[in-house]
Every structure is written in structure tokens, then in C-alpha cells.
Image (cartoon, helix red, strand yellow):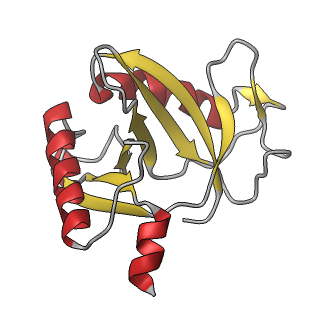
Amino acid sequence: YSPYLIAETSVRADSMREASGKGFREVAGYVFGKNRPATKMAMTAPVRMSSDPRGGVPSTTRVSFVLEKSYSRRTAPAPLRGQDVRVRSVAPHLLAARSFSGPPPSEKRVSSERQRVLDALSAAGLRPASDGETLLYGYHDPFITPSFMRKNEVAVRVEDSAAEVRAS
């Protein structure tokens, strides 16, 4: 992925699923105009969540939306004072992901899908990035999309040098 901007909040909760609701509302508020200078932005997909690789309960889950390409760090609206949202740049990266349908997944499902991604990386001679971060993407309107039609992905970053070596 090329570099992009996200609007992100951090939520401490017992699970990613629990954190998603609070985090979604906080970041959606920012996107829908709770910002300076009160700018409504387009809602983008997917909702992006990442877990704290150190684990523990409660853990920290970051919930974010990718901002439209028309925004830069300089032109993106500022979060309101007291709002727990920040706009930050995401560096270029390579992901390995596994897609599946269904409701927002449980921690057990996320862990199982992550292991499948790690096994596929190993079989391909690639290495996950050392940060250990697990990314979860939801590509659906959480209020109207039936569970069986929801698309989810669990992803891990791939160590770029390992991918470059394989590609040459």
C-alpha cells in the first residue's frame, strides 16, 4: 500500500469487538463534522482496527477510517479539543490478509485467521513484520448489512525486505 492518512482513536476494552463500537462512534463523529472547521467528509471503507501486540486484558484497540486522498496532513480538518481522535500518516507497507464473511469476529476467530495468514507466509518463505500487529478490516455498513453479507479481513504486515528478496 502507498502512504495514506487515517483518522484514529484508541479504545481500552476486553476485546476488539467491544472496542469497535465506541471507536467507530468517535471516529465517525470526526468524519461527519465534529472537527475544525466543521467539515463533513465522505465515509470510507473499510473500518480499520488494530490490536496492541503486547496483548493483555483490557487491551488497546485502535479504530480508524482512511481519509479521502484529497486530504493531506496540512488540509485534513483538525479534531475538536477534547476529542480522542488524531489524524496520522501510515507509511507504505505490504500486507498479507485473509478474507471471510460474517459478523464482526470474536478474538478467537481473529486469532485463528491470523494464524492461517502466518502459516501461508511461512509456506511462501516470507516473514511477518516484527511489530506483531494484527489488523482487522470491516467492509460493510454495520447498521444495515446482514451478517452473512459482511466482508472481514485479518491481516499482518509483511517484512518488506523478505518480500523484495522473493520478488527478485
Quick one: which residue is furthest to the bottom in this view? 168
Q: Is residue 95 above or below residue 130?
A: below
Task: Work out whether residue 123 can be spotted.
Answer: yes
- The image quadrant where one finds the C terminus is bottom left
- The image quadrant where one finds the N terminus is bottom right
Q: Position of residue 69 (x, y in %)?
A: 69, 60
Q: Is residue 116 above or below residue 59?
A: below
- Toward the viewer: 103 or 141? 103
Q: Position of residue 70 (x, y in %)?
A: 75, 59
- Toward the viewer: 26 or 142? 26
- Toward the viewer: 161 or 78? 161
Image point 16% across, 56% down: which residue? 116
Image point 19% across, 54% down: which residue? 101
Task: Work out whether residue 32 can be spotted.
Answer: no
Residue 121: name its quadrant. bottom left
In the rendered structure, the answer to whether residue 66 lies left or right of residue 166 reads right
Q: How many marks?
A: 0
Image point 41% across, 69% down: which residue? 162
Q: Position of residue 128 (x, y in %)?
A: 35, 55
Image point 31% across, 60% down: which residue? 97
Q: Is residue 51 above or below residue 1?
A: above
In the rendered structure, the answer to whether residue 157 lies left or right of residue 153 reads right
In the rendered structure, the answer to whether residue 138 lies left or right of residue 81 reads left
- Toward the viewer: 50 or 123? 123
Q: Position of residue 91 (x, y in %)?
A: 62, 54
